[in-house]
Image (spheres, helix red, strand yellow):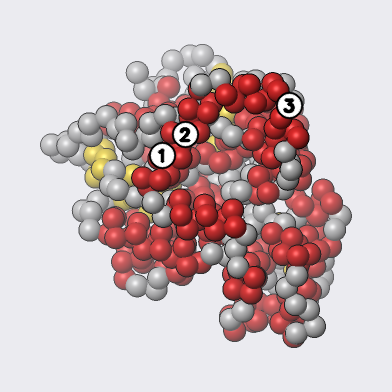
Amino acid sequence: MGDNCKDILNKCSRCGGCQAHCPLYSETGRESFVARGKIELLENLQSGNLDWNDSLAEIFSTCLLCGSCTENCPNGVRADKLIMSARKDLVTARGLPIIKRNIFQHLLKYNGRLNKAGRLLSVYQKSGLQKLMRASGILNMLPLDLGKKESLLPQIVSKSFRENLPGLNKLSNPRFKVAYFTGCVTNLVKPQVGYSLLKVLGANNVEVVIPEQFCCGIPAIASGDIETGRFLAEENIKQFVNLEVDYVIMDCATCLSTWLKYPELFANKEAFDLAKKVIDINRFLVEILDIKIFSKELGIKVTYHDPCHLKRTPSGRSSPRELLKRLSPSYEFEEMEVSDRCCGSAGSFNLTHYDLSQNVAQHKVKAILKSQANVVASSCPSCIMQLEHSLKKKNLDTPVKHTIELVADCHQ
Ligand code: SF4
Ligand code: SF4
């Protein structure tokens, strides 16, 4: 742990204020899951009173990194940063679990392998094998709750968005030229988000380029595998740095927040220059394009879930709402209760801690039901998948869509 983190540790006064804001503490009541409890353990690890063991590894992996404790701490303690740093120390001390090591170091670093894995999963789903496995009950007999985890598997496309790209038009006099970082979920699971984005930007005279690109790195970084995270960040910087574009557009809140942290991984000019160009699609449409939407009257009630990684970026709360309001009268925006509470997805947290993650998500399900919305919008493909799964578990078929899909619906 660096000096910087030691300074953060020393700022904690043990007031316990973070308990009221931690979604995991609210589910479990366990002090070790909240920021104060983890800080106590970190101090003991620091001073040598404790050594890393299985139980501590589990405690430090049990965090959504939602940042709610950090946002509400009266002393400005960056607990999320401490927890990330602890995960890095854990990997140094004990190495990565074998599944994560294989995924991060042998899959994420290679787009070809990632696409192949996507195709295999797509065959598993489309050939009827998935249906058979689910109906046979075999999945429920597997260890480590693999049956439940398999139920989270979204429909994977047989050809990724970037492999299946329509020709991108070079415009003669575009208002802006942008590069699009598609993120893995849009690329492999939700290509409709990408097509919607291209449709809306094309209709508004914005030229789009989509260079070769890699996972943003967050699955590895959040698991303490900083080396792989740095490798992926460096590859992305190389691909984007020489493009002559005004902005780098993101449709994924998590990718956006990761790109904004690239300068922390690489304190070089390229990383800083790119971080200045990175912008969320909602903000781009509202603040840069000032988009006007002439929608027809349908009056669909829409509510909005705030992704944790978007709401703390500039205009991260206001621009998606402003965009949704501009969709009236086609869509009528209705705020939901606890709109900015974490949905429990947190990258792979819903896989590693399925039951706890679903308990966290049920607060959103209740709020969605109470809002009586016909459709839920969000701005992070991972949150969208989590909400879809949690609603389905309750036999609810309320669609969950990216804001850009709704905007595209209003562009004929
Ligand atoms: S992390 Fe912040 S809110 Fe939590 S106990 Fe420490 S000072 Fe209080
Ligand atoms: S980041 Fe979120 S889940 Fe983790 S300790 Fe803080 S409030 Fe709890």
Pointer 1 local density, CA inside 10 Å: few below 14, some 14–19, many at least 20: some
Relative to residue 365, is residue 93 depicted above or below?
Answer: below
Say whether mark 3 is within 8 Å of ligand 2.
no
Residue 376, given in percent of the width and then of the height, sits at: 60, 29
Q: Does the residue at mark 1 contact the one at mark 2 (Cβ under 8 Å)?
A: yes
Pointer 2 residue? 120
Q: Identify residue type, mark 1.
A: Lys
Residue 108, given in percent of the width and then of the height, sits at: 45, 52
- Of residues 146 and 408, the one drawn nearer to the viewer in this rendering: 146
- Of residues 133 and 93, the one drawn nearer to the viewer in this rendering: 133
Pointer 3 residue? 137
Q: Can residue 44 be seen in this view?
A: yes
Pointer 2 local density, CA inside 10 Å: few below 14, some 14–19, many at least 20: some
Q: Does the residue at mark 3 contact the one at mark 1 (Cβ under 8 Å)?
A: no
Residue drawn at (61%, 79%) of the image? 1
Q: Which mark is residue 116?
A: 1
Q: Is residue 338 visible?
A: no
Q: Identify residue type, mark 2.
A: Leu
